[in-house]
Image (cartoon, helix red, strand yellow):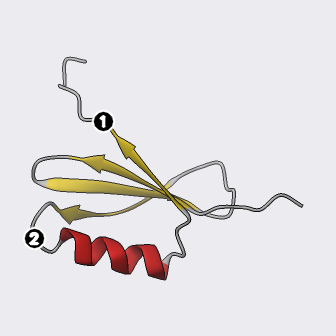
Amino acid sequence: MPQKNNLLALDVGSKRIGLAIVADGVAVPRALPALENDDDFLINLKTILADKKIDELVVGLPRNLDG
């Protein structure tokens, strides 16, 4: 049986960082509360990585609203 991974996607913004999780191979991501993009971000992210048993991170590249 193939190993299933828990993925965490980050949508990086200048003020907040959006989070979505795809757990145990489920095809539909579930939004998590956004984190403030501040000095505590890495501490908060590490907590989420451990609590949700995240195996992989996916980081979106910022783009302007006009594409």
Q: In which quarter of the image is residue 19?
A: bottom left
Vertical comparison of 26 with 59: above or below: below
Vertical comparison of 65 with 41: above or below: above
What's the residue at 56%, 65% (across, down)? 55
What's the residue at 30%, 35% (across, down)? 61
Q: Quadrant of residue 5?
A: bottom right
Q: On the rendered image, what quadrant is the N terminus found in?
A: bottom right
Q: Which amino acid does label 1 sit on?
A: Leu
Labelled disc at residue 39: 2
Q: On the rendered image, what quadrant is the C terminus found in?
A: top left
Labelled disc at residue 61: 1
Please name whichever residue, 21 or 31, is drawn nearer the observer in this view of the structure.
21
Q: In this view, does 59 lie to the left or right of 16?
A: right
Q: Gap in Å between the C-alphas at discs 2 and 1?
A: 21 Å
Q: Earlier in the sequence, mark 2 or mark 1?
A: 2
Q: Secondary structure beneath disc 2?
A: loop
The picture places residue 3, in percent across and down from the top left corner, at 77, 62
Total numbered labels = 2
Q: Which amino acid does label 2 sit on?
A: Asp
What's the residue at 83%, 58% (across, down)? 2
Q: Secondary structure beneath disc 1?
A: loop
The picture places residue 6, in percent across and down from the top left corner, at 59, 63
> Within 10 Å of the Cα at label 2, are there few (<14), some (14-19), or many (20+) other Cα atoms?
few
